[in-house]
Amino acid sequence: MSKPPELTPSLWKSHKEGYKDSLSYMLGRQKGTIKSLKTPWVKFNDATTDGLEWNSLTVIGGRPASGKTLIKDQIVRKAKELNADQEFRVLEFQFEMLARTSAIREYCSVLGKDYKYLCSANGVLSDADLTKCYEYAKTKADYPLDIVESPLTVSEIVLQITMYMNKYAVKDETTGFWKYINTIVTIDHSFLVKKASYEKDKFDTLYNLGEALTELKRKYPIAFIVLSQLNRNVDSPERNEDGKYGNYILDSDIFAADALLQHADTVIGINRPALRKIRFYGPDRYIIEDDTVLVMHFLKCRNGDTRMSFFRAAFKTMEIKEMETPAMQERRKLT
């Protein structure tokens, strides 16, 4: 009997190939030819695999004004400085704010001035500070960053990313093969992805987005950063009482959690307790001094460690810094 013909191309690979790929990756990490993208924060890098791995998806969820866009912006803004030995590009899907707004926020960080002042809404912007902005813009003119401002459907996002990766692919002079360049891709934020005509609701859109990003991160050396809002139940009164476990952001609080979390490698929930009048945070009753204190809940770290870390945000100058873990409220001893 002759061998039956194969009806379709096989999709499986041998376990041997898996070992080969893993050892090659480990060797590259050991030799320093393969590296993660370092972020500006030691705590963030330590929770993950020394930063954001390429071929990965990071989801950052938080309420409005919690600092999630600021975190994304600071990662992008500091990326070249902190990873000078790596070649990469940045493609941002900014569905929430204009590129102009994002640039002004960046000037805020550089000058240590607030947004209103730079827009002459809190005193007239001085010629000297405007000149500093011009000079800074010149230094960033060659920064390999591109921005998409128009809301798109999932399929349109996939098309733009595919075109982008092909456009900037480079030819390896040794092998003659074309190679995709490492790329940071940000989506701010997921709820603003445009619903396609064939999708019944936003949940359907986000399921399609999660599946699309998984396919893309398998195909291309992309580090995705996707910002998401939280579900309404996080604002229920019982969750904002001092010293309750409900103070903490949970993975189920991420909007349409099932749609994105199963695809994500890292999931971070951001909280600003003082905005909800929480003075003692969680059952350990961490003392929250003011509304600049941010809490990052590392809810899922596929290749790292889940934890809770504290940061301080200077929203006027658009910068986030690490801080020591706050002291806990002393509890009365029972006698």
Image (spheres, rainbow, N blue to C red):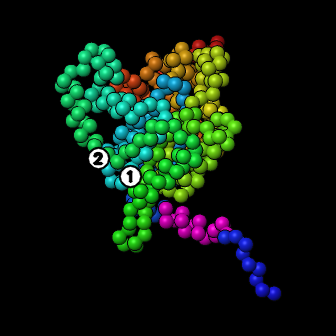
Q: Position of residue 26 (x, y in %)?
A: 49, 61
Residue appearing at x 49%, y 26% in the figure: 66
Judged from the image, the secondary structure of the residue bearing numbered disc 2 is loop
Question: In this orientation, which residue lies closer to the viewer: 198 or 258?
Answer: 198
Judged from the image, the secondary structure of the residue bearing numbered disc 1 is strand
Residue appearing at x 57%, y 42% in the figure: 153
Q: Amino acid at mark 1?
A: Phe
Q: Position of residue 147 (x, y in %)?
A: 41, 41
Q: Position of residue 190 (x, y in %)?
A: 56, 36
Q: CA distance from mark 1 to mark 2?
A: 13 Å
Q: Which residue is outermost to the right?
A: 1
Report which quarter residue 61 is drawn in. Answer: top right
Q: Residues within 10 Å of mark 1 (few under 14, many from 20)?
A: many
Question: In this orientation, which residue lies closer to the viewer: 175 or 201?
Answer: 201
Magenta stretch bounds? 10-25
Whether residue 138 is visible here, answered yes or no, is yes
Q: Earlier in the sequence, mark 1 or mark 2?
A: 1
Is 71 positioned to the left or the right of 267 in the image?
Answer: left
Q: Main secondary structure of the magenta part?
A: helix
Q: Which residue is outermost to the bottom?
A: 1
Q: Is residue 14 magenta?
A: yes
Quadrant (top left/top right/bottom left/bottom right) for the N terminus: bottom right
Q: Which disc is residue 205 wearing?
A: none
Q: Amino acid at mark 2?
A: Asp
Tell me how many marks there are.
2
Badge 1 is on which residue? 88
Q: Which disc is residue 142 wearing?
A: 2
Location of residue 160 with respect to 123 vertically, above or below:
below
Q: Which residue is outermost to the front?
A: 197
Q: Is residue 162 magenta?
A: no
